[in-house]
Every structure is written in structure tokens, then in C-alpha cells.
Amino acid sequence: MESDLDLQHSIDRAVALLNSGEVVAIPTETVYGLGASINSPEAIEYIFELKGRPRTNPLIVHVANLEQAKSLFSNFPAELEVLANQFWPGSLTLVLPKSNKVSDQITAGKNTVGIRVPNHPILLKVLEQTGPIAAPSANPFERISPTTAQHVSNYFPKGLKMVLDGGPCQAGIESTIVGYENSRITVYRLGAISIEQIETLVGKVALHDGTKSKVVTPGMSKKHYAPQTKTIVTKNITEFIDKHPNAKIGTINFQHISASNAFIQLVLSTSGDLKEAATNIYQFLHKLDELKLDYIVIEPLPDVELGRSVNERLSRAVHL
Ligand code: TXA
Ligand code: MG
């Protein structure tokens, strides 16, 4: 573990780099991000390059507090402010019309911007000294998001001046993205805040299913978050293993290991806690992906609360 002095030194270095127009990998409570000041167009351009991300896919902006968010939105409906008050700092990204402080480069030409106040003490310290930071998840396009500093270094062994290590991500999956369409709260991406948590506060919300209709949130495009290893999601792991007797298989179960042997068997939460399962899922996928398996076979989670968010991610990880 880093001493307080080392940590302070790392924070100071990250702030100095960001303020001088460099890209720094930053910890958040959801997943690690590739961060750049919203006032550094070259650094933002470099993020797209590093990720291999299409220029049509906008970045979200991370701010230290609600006031900063307000200065970047041109309009903030009261209903969404209720959500911000409840969930910030936290894993909720709000998409609203942008103010002129946000460039078209960040929003990929859209007139809206996605913003959140992350719930990570180290990143909040950084944001207080840098101002708004644009940051997509710190993975190459279509790969699994990183949940440790090591995952980021593995993805980008070269090309980054600094990975600010904030420990393993507590939420472990990306933020929930919420917008406002035709005066209705609309969820664009399921994530670390459940729809149930949101609906408790503001009543029924719309869900924009990007897999069926035009892509509003490019993160909803069908194939995303995929391991390199062939990945299967099935309720019957035992049957799959029996049918592939010679294959090297790693399994991920929700609560209990299935009754058959595999090369490696992981359990997301022995107590059946969906939040713990969400925290572990990417970590496990990264781990299994390193083992050069023939298959990763995963049991779907109960389709409620964060189980629904994880299942949605798994549906993108599968190799059809
Ligand atoms: O948890 C997270 O949200 C992480 C951490 C680093 O904060 N970030 C993250 O960023 O997941 P990214 O870029 O990997 O995913 C953000 C998604 C993208 O799919 C992007 O298309 C969508 O948000 N998005 C950003 N701005 C948008 C906008 N104005 N309208 C619609 N979708 C937007
Ligand atoms: Mg991403």
C-alpha cells in the first residue's frame, strides 16, 4: 500500500500532467478512465487515438460537484436534479443539453453532454484542482473495461505518462446513463445504479434499448465489452462442459459452483449479493481471459437490480 506521502505525490503529479495537457489514466468507483482536461483538445484527440474509438462516440465529463455540472449544462430539469442530489457523487451519468463550455469534440457534435460526479476520493481530489475532465473507460474499443490500475497498464503498456492507482474499483461496472427525452427520464445504459433505485425516487422511467432501434448511445451498440476468449452465457453450465469434454473451460457462477469440473471455477458472490457480483464480474473476465482458455462459460444473474445491468453486459460479451 502506498504511504500518504506517496499518494499525495501521485495526486500532485496527475494534476500537473492533466493541467499541462496530458492524458492520465484515472481511477473512478465504476471503472478506470482515460482522462484529459476539457480544455486540452490535443489530449482529447489522443484519447480517441489511443482507444481506437470512433470520433462519432462522445466522451463523458467528470466534475467535482453539482455546481460544476450546472455550468456545463444549459438546462437542468428539476427531476434530474433530484437524481443528481441523491446519487452524486456516484455512478450516474446525466445527459443534458450542453453549455458553450463543452466543445463539439467532446460531444462528437451532439448538443448534449454526459456528466457525472464520480465517487472516488482520490479522483475528487484531482478534479478539485483540474476542473472538468473528459474520460471514457480506459480500454481499447470493444474490450472489457479495466477495474484495476494493472488492467490499464496491460492494455496500454506504452502511450500513457501515468496511471493513477486508486485501488480496485468498488462498483466494478460502468455508470448508469440517464437522459431526458420528450419530458421523460430515459435510461440509455444500464449500469452501477439500478433502475429500481432510480424509479424509487422519480417513478417509472423509459428504457432506451439501443440494440433494437437507432443508436442514441453508442455504448449500446450490440458488440462491446468482449473478452478475447470465446464466451458463452448459459443456465446450464454442466451440460456445456459435458458436451465439450476436451476443452479447457473457465466458469463463472453467481452463487454456487455448478456440479461439474472445469479448469477453473469462480463464484461472483457466495452470499448472493448482486452488488458484489457486479463488483467482481469484469475482474473475473480479465482474470479468465489471461488463462488462454477455450471457453469462458457464465451463468446469467437474476434479472433484477444490478443483476440486470450485469446480464446486459454479458449479452455483449458473448461470441455468437
Ligand atoms: O462509469 C463510467 O461511465 C466510466 C467512467 C470512466 O466514468 N466511463 C465510461 O465512458 O464508461 P465510456 O466513454 O466508455 O462510455 C460512455 C458512454 C458511451 O457509450 C457514449 O456513447 C455515451 O456514454 N455518451 C456520452 N455522451 C453522450 C451523449 N451526449 N449522448 C448520448 N450518449 C452519450
Ligand atoms: Mg467504455
Image (tube, rainbow, N blue to C red):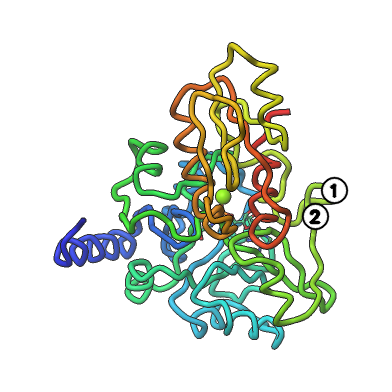
Residue furthest toward the top?
246
Residue at the spot 67% in from the left edge and 19% down from the top edge: 242
Element under label 2? loop
The answer to which image quadrant residue 120 occupies is: bottom left
Q: Distance between the residues labelled 1 and 2?
A: 6 Å
Q: Where is residue 93 in the image (x, y as percent from the top left)?
A: 60, 68
Q: Where residue 295 sits in the image (x, y, percent)?
A: 59, 24
**Amino acid type indicated by mark 1:** Lys
Q: Which mark is residue 209?
A: 2
- Read off the residue under disc 1: 212
> Hey, which residue is sitting farthest bottom in the picture?
78
Query: Does the numbered disc 2 mark a residue whose Cβ is under 8 Å from ligand 1?
Result: no
Q: In this view, does 90 lie above or below 71?
A: above
Q: Do the residues under discs 1 and 2 have CB atoms within 8 angstroms?
A: yes
Asked whether mark 1 and ligand 1 are closer than 8 Å, the reply comes as: no
**Residue 67 marker:** none
Q: Residue furthest front?
A: 259
**Residue flagged by tag 2: what amino acid is it?**
Asp
Q: Does residue 23 appear anywhere in the picture?
A: no
Q: Nearer the viewer, residue 279 or 23?
A: 279
Q: In which quarter of the image is ligand 1?
A: bottom right
Residue 115 in picture, x, y percent from top left = 57, 70
Left or right of 254, for residue 289: left
Q: Is residue 176 visible?
A: yes
Q: How crowded is mark 1: few (under 14 residues within 10 Å), some or many (20 or more)?
A: few
Q: Which residue is drawn at 54% across and 70% down?
A: 116
In the image, residue 320 lies at what x, y percent?
74, 28
Kind of element beneath mark 1 = loop
